[in-house]
Image (cartoon, rainbow, N blue to C red):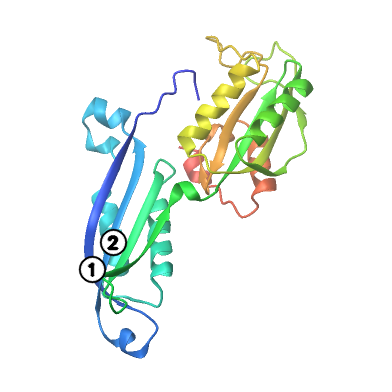
Amino acid sequence: MGATYHPKLSEIRVEKLRLRAYIGFIDWEKEKLQDVIISFSFKYDTALASETDEVAHAVDYKKITKKIIDFVDLKSFHLIESLAEKVFLRIQSFGPALEDIKVKVEKPHALRFTDNVLVEIAGHDRYNTAVIALGSNINSEENFSKALVNLQELGFIMQRTTFIKTAPLKFEDQPDFLNGALLLNTKKSLSELKMNLKQIEALLGRVRSENKNAPREIDLDVLTYNGFLIDEEIQELPFLLDFVRELQPEFQVDRSALEK
């Protein structure tokens, strides 16, 4: 993440997707198709799509909509809460670039004397899980301590690795690095988290130069976010992969993707 990271978020909305499903736990509800109305929205960084006007750089909301239709239409569910959650997770599975996901599921005329019953899920109300890597070879212990204080302001530090010394790579004429990682629960979106990390680096005195491998007061990077691999530098620095395995043993790294 360089100093020129400036995301341009835009919101995509799909409203009033009208489907039919068996929704409810009462016997007649299990046998009779009912109307289900689904609306959803999300934000993503549209800078590249806007600049190039190329569909390849845009999020395919038609594909997302089709996935929801295939999952819901003519299927059976007991609770609209469960249905809303599963729709939310399916949208989230399209990648970490989708931020501030919102889902609304409506069940018209579900109660007497009412027009509607609905469930809404807002992604900004939920905690995201991220693995943050730390590195420093200038006053490293002092800067690690300062960084940890600042990182606590972004959420809850649930666990951290042992901090280790590693030899510099690529640019070897510099002191060894202190490296480590932590597991953070945060309500920050991925773009917000990246911007916050860049701010912490600046506050601790990091000045970027043409030599991206130069000594630094602190280096903070998102390794994983909500189960997605974010930092592909893992393939060049194996200890980063070790950190992820320690903090998220369930995380599966696609080695074939890393080798591309």
Position of 130 with respect to 96 (left or right) is right
Where residue 6 sits: x, y (%)? Answer: 41, 24
Viewer can see residue 93: no
Quarter of image, res 138: top right
Q: Is residue 253 above or below residue 147?
A: below
Circles 2 and 1: CB distance less than 8 Å? yes
Amino acid beneath label 2? Ile
In terms of secondary structure, where does tag 1 sit?
strand
Instruction: Identify residue for label 2.
Output: 38
Quarter of image, res 90: bottom left
Front residue of 16 and 70: 16
Instruction: Identify residue for label 1.
Output: 19
Q: Is residue 97 above or below residue 147?
A: below
Position of 111 with respect to 217 (left or right) is left
In terms of secondary structure, where does tag 2 sit?
strand
Q: Residues within 10 Å of mark 1 (few under 14, many from 20)?
A: some
Where residue 58 sits: x, y (%)? Answer: 28, 38
Viewer can see residue 102: yes
Q: Residue furthest front?
A: 113
Amino acid beneath label 1? Leu
- The residue depicted at 41 percent of the width and 74 percent of the height is 79
In the rendered structure, which disc, 2 or 1, sits on the residue that comes first in sequence? 1
Q: CA distance from mark 2 to mark 1?
A: 8 Å
Where residue 237 sits: x, y (%)? Answer: 63, 31
Where residue 9 sits: x, y (%)? Answer: 35, 33
Front residue of 244 and 170: 244
- The residue depicted at 77 percent of the width and 38 percent of the height is 162
Front residue of 120 and 215: 120
Q: Is residue 260 above or below residue 217?
A: below
- The residue depicted at 68 percent of the width and 15 percent of the height is 172
In the rendered image, which quarter contains the C terminus?
top left
Position of 85 with respect to 42 (left or right) is right
